[in-house]
Amino acid sequence: MHDDIQERRQFTVSIASSVLFAGLQFHDGDRLSNFELMSGPQRLCSKGHFLSHEGEPRPDLYLLRSGWLCCSITTPAGDRQITTIHLPGDLVGMPSIAREVAAETISALTDCVVDIIPLEAFAVAFRQHPRLAALLYMSAQEERVRLIHQLTLVGRVHSVKRMAAFLLSIYHRVRVNVAGVDDSFALPLTQQDLGDATGMSVVHANRALRILRERGYASLQKGTLTVHDYPGLVTFAGSPADSKRSTAWI
Amino acid sequence: MHDDIQERRQFTVSIASSVLFAGLQFHDGDRLSNFELMSGPQRLCSKGHFLSHEGEPRPDLYLLRSGWLCCSITTPAGDRQITTIHLPGDLVGMPSIAREVAAETISALTDCVVDIIPLEAFAVAFRQHPRLAALLYMSAQEERVRLIHQLTLVGRVHSVKRMAAFLLSIYHRVRVNVAGVDDSFALPLTQQDLGDATGMSVVHANRALRILRERGYASLQKGTLTVHDYPGLVTFAGSPADSKRSTAWI
DNA sequence: CGAGCTTTTGAATTCCTTCAAGACTCGTGG
DNA sequence: CCACGAGTCTTGAAGGAATTCAAAAGCTCG
């Protein structure tokens, strides 16, 4: 199925959070226009504002063009759990597609630009572009794996290692997604956000960060995350190596 | 897109964990045979044994015919996090499809019968049965929502409510999936399993269950879960009401 | 330049885990 | 049929981990 590929095009747009499609190449017959049908009117969302709220009927779907977003859920007790961090190229809001009401609140960590994707685009994709549909499906599964790992982290790993693993997961995604990132990059998350993502209080998030800094693994200062000792951090976090993606069945 | 549906068929098989397709009806043109192409050789797995292990290359995909399965991840420290409970009708092992290596360990909570689904079946589904592919996609998104809720539970909800919400989530799934279930049904999970699923120790799981029993919400005895006060349990757990699924875009 | 958000630290408290030990259950083999 | 052992359930007690409370200092943006 792979062998007949002659002309290829490289995409730089990722589909669904955390899945970068840069490495994937499409048969030319698929055409870049597959993606075009998925773009709609643009929308701006400035830092701290919301794209949609949990419980809202018929939420839109977005393709994040620039900036960082995060998705979160608020408990009846008023606590917030951040479930996903979205980087440019991510498809945002997909989980709610199978529901009548938005499953998550989507908020902007920085100023953002998004395309609003018409629902109809997906119907077209599934009817007429099976390869694209299959890739969308794979990226949804990839996202499930990410959530499974996050769940394991939050449920079973102590705070400092948890913070280490979480920072690493973002670091990895940013490195693939964004050009010119070295050991240091802008991380637009407050310590409150880090706590809400890893399931700990702000105070404890701060202490976890301090320990990581003191041990020389990584430090977060003025919105910049610097990884001082990458191998050490990986060993300390004990996070499983990401295995490569397999697309053979498509 | 919906209007031209004349003859319908009702399926009783669910696709992907937690998503029951009983309520969905297919256009007759889709044919039940769409499902046939997804069934392969059967395999038995007796209680306590494993269908596949985390890290194993090229794991199989399964359709669970009877029995209960669970998927889990083991941390470097040796702790286990149960990520999903699978009921009959569930598609099991999908998250690993996008990886070269199994993301989860799949183990049998009871004696089980599964069909092994050839990978090729999915390629066929996406190429030739777009409606089926779209439904598979939706169920993957549904599963993401379930994971998001579980993550929120584990990260942000105190132990007793967490246990209550977890039991409720299983109760709901069992009620839709299995015929003849009333307020009482066999729950093949040990307290260790409940702890591993909700991110608490066995001892604490036991205490959480005791409190739920003492307050008259629900009790788990000899492998049977009995919900004594459903409305009370729902209120106590504070779990968000499941909104209906929307399939309009297909 | 001041208000509000964020970061940081200490101290007290609460929640949860670990350890330990006894009771119970269930399947197995004598 | 009973005894045994492994796994499960249950409870108490001690210790550890994370939260909450509180307060000060730093930052940022209008």
Image (tube, coloured by chain):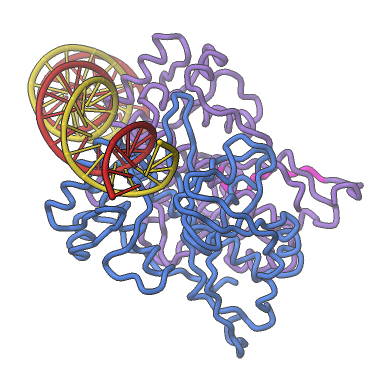
Chain colours: A purple, B blue, C yellow, D red
| Quarter of image, res B184 | bottom left
Q: Is residue A238 positioned above or below A123 on the image?
A: above
Viewer-proximal residue among C15 and A42: C15
Horizontal side of residue A140 vs B182, given as left or right: right
Q: Is residue C25 positioned above or below C10 on the image?
A: below
Asked if residue A10 is among those painted magenta in the image, a careful observer would answer yes
Percent across and percent down for residue C11 are 11, 15
Horizontal side of residue A238 vs A53, given as left or right: right
Main SS of the magenta segment? loop
**Disc count in the image?**
0
Horizontal side of residue A39 vs B242, given as left or right: right
Q: Determine if residue B74 is in view.
A: yes
Percent across and percent down for residue B177 are 44, 68
Horizontal side of residue B38 vs D19, given as left or right: right
Percent across and percent down for residue A203 are 27, 25
Q: Is residue B134 positioned above or below A46 on the image?
A: below
Viewer-proximal residue among B145 and A206: B145
Q: Which residues fall within the magenta stretch?
A: A9-17
| Quarter of image, res D10 | top left
Outermost bottom residue: B6
Q: Determine if residue A80 is in view.
A: no
The residue depicted at 56 percent of the width and 58 percent of the height is B113
Asked if residue A14 is among those painted magenta in the image, a careful observer would answer yes
The residue depicted at 80 percent of the width and 57 percent of the height is A30
The residue depicted at 71 percent of the width and 65 percent of the height is B125
Viewer-proximal residue among B223 and B243: B223
Q: Is residue A37 positioned above or below A81 on the image?
A: below
Percent across and percent down for residue A92 are 53, 51
